[in-house]
Image (spheres, helix red, strand yellow):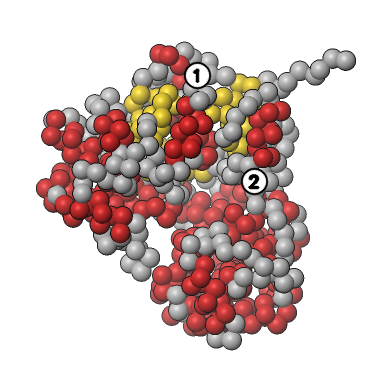
Amino acid sequence: MNTPPLPAVALPQYDRSRLRPGIVHIGLGNFHRAHMAVYLDDLFNLGEGHDWAILGAGVREGDAKMRAALVAQDCLSTVIELDPKGRRARRVGSMIGFLEVQPDNAALIAAMARPEIRIVSLTVTEGGYFIDPDTGSFDPTAAEIAADAADPDHPATAFGAILAALRLRRTAGEAPFTVMSCDNLPGNGHATRAAVVGLARLSDPALAEWVQAHVAFPNGMVDRITPATGPRERAMAEAFGLVDPVPVTCEPFRQWVLEDHFPAGRPALEKVGVTFTPHVHAYEAMKIRILNGGHAIIAYPAGLMDIDYVHEAMAHPLILSFLDRVEGDEIIPYVAPVPNTDLTRYYGTIRARFSNPEVADTVRRLCLDGSNRQPKFIVPSAQDAAAAGGTVAGLALVSALWCRYCYGVTDSGAVIAPNDPNWTMLNALAQEARTTPDAWLGNRAVYGELAKSERFAQAFGAALRSLWSNGTKATIEAYLAR
């Protein structure tokens, strides 16, 4: 009996031994390996930019496990694109080393201080920028920041390590590297600058002024749905004949928009699809409001209706109609124009991406960390709609669904496991809001000035009362019938 041949795996079309490092990347999670590392791999396959290879790095104890897995396979990453027409696998070779993970980050600091390193990039999650939720600004009182300020030569945070390396380069007379955030938060370059400069001011004001004057922090927008890795993803790698404990799966779509502000130079990423523009904020607002806001719109009703996967939620006519109505009436009309982009067509792409069954993205993942995501992805749209005199009933219902979710049980009575860093506080508020809806809107860190909108508060209260009296399905049906 003949064994069927294994599917083909695309391999690097360049000599990896000839690559030279130009980038240190902090935070080697799935997203980075399916996004920036793939763009660079594409560029290297064109025969260009071979002095821009990546040195991986991490500042958390858990990063050591990823380092061990990747070093064991010569820092190659398996990336599997989940196209409904057929899966495609590639081995991405753009990373050529992974620095030792140390409590004081000595190896990381030494690498970033090397003159050939011209970009330091990072994916440290949306919540990793020490932003005070009440002010929206850098929080210099955060415990980890205070610890780094007290001992700047032995920093534990990514920002402390970046600052220590910049100090060494300034002392040596070397030009600074560019610091490039690849995290999904508004104004990620501004947030990164605030963290680095704010930390410097606590221990070395002169260095803070030098960083402010000489170090570039370009803003960027990143986009690619990248599920977590588990047994299903490892089995996919095995189907391609690959034994890899940390394969990455992702949707076919990817997008990267950057400000072209790289004084120390950059790879020619425009040749592999990256958009360089001074209008990053417009792309960013579009993506955060339409895509990330859309995730919230479908996630909480799906969670309350015991739906496990995003594509299953999209196949539910009620949830899909809810998404279409809120996007069309309360989000897209208030998104500023984006260069060379038709917003209606962009939303159509989002719909198709959410519906991809191959991705098998979970509803629970989309429901995660609402306390950090709602003020970025939902509240700004509601504020704009309210200010323009438009309807806010749909977005108020999205907030009410989130509140109802945080109560901790679905409509069927199934227990919802804690799914937010602030779950204990949110759960207590949700219990109080069951009889006093305004208690939920009192969470100023999320709602800010929006809580003062009488129209939004009334719509929220009516939606929450209906969710408790009638359930999720009937409440959304009533909203759609209006």
Q: Is residue 479 visible to us here?
A: yes
Q: Nearer the viewer, residue 320 or 467?
A: 467
- 149 lies left or right of 86: left
Of callouts 2 and 1, the N-terminal one = 1
Q: Nearer the viewer, residue 437 or 450?
A: 437
Residue 26: x and y in percent read: 38, 39
Q: Is residue 387 visible to us here?
A: no
- Which residue carries the number 1 mark? 45
Q: State whether residue 454 is above or below residue 340.
A: below
Q: Amino acid at mark 2?
A: Arg
Q: Amino acid at mark 1?
A: Asn
Q: Residues within 10 Å of mark 1 (few under 14, many from 20)?
A: some
Does dot 2 land on a helix, a strand or a loop? helix
Residue 478: x and y in percent read: 72, 76
Q: Residue at x 60, y 41 (%)?
A: 229
* Residue sticking out furthest to the bottom: 435
Q: Alpha carbon of mark 2 to alpha carbon of mark 1: how far? A: 27 Å
Q: Quadrant of the C terminus?
A: bottom right
Residue 438: x and y in percent read: 51, 83
Residue 130: x and y in percent read: 34, 57
- Which residue carries the number 2 mark? 353
Q: Residue at x 62, y 78 (%)?
A: 463
Q: State whether residue 447 is above or below residue 437.
A: above
Q: Residue at x 56, y 24 (%)?
A: 91
- 62 lies left or right of 196: right
Q: Residue at x 60, y 29 (%)?
A: 244
Does dot 1 land on a helix, a strand or a loop? helix
Q: Quadrant of the N terminus?
A: top right
- 460 lies left or right of 308: left
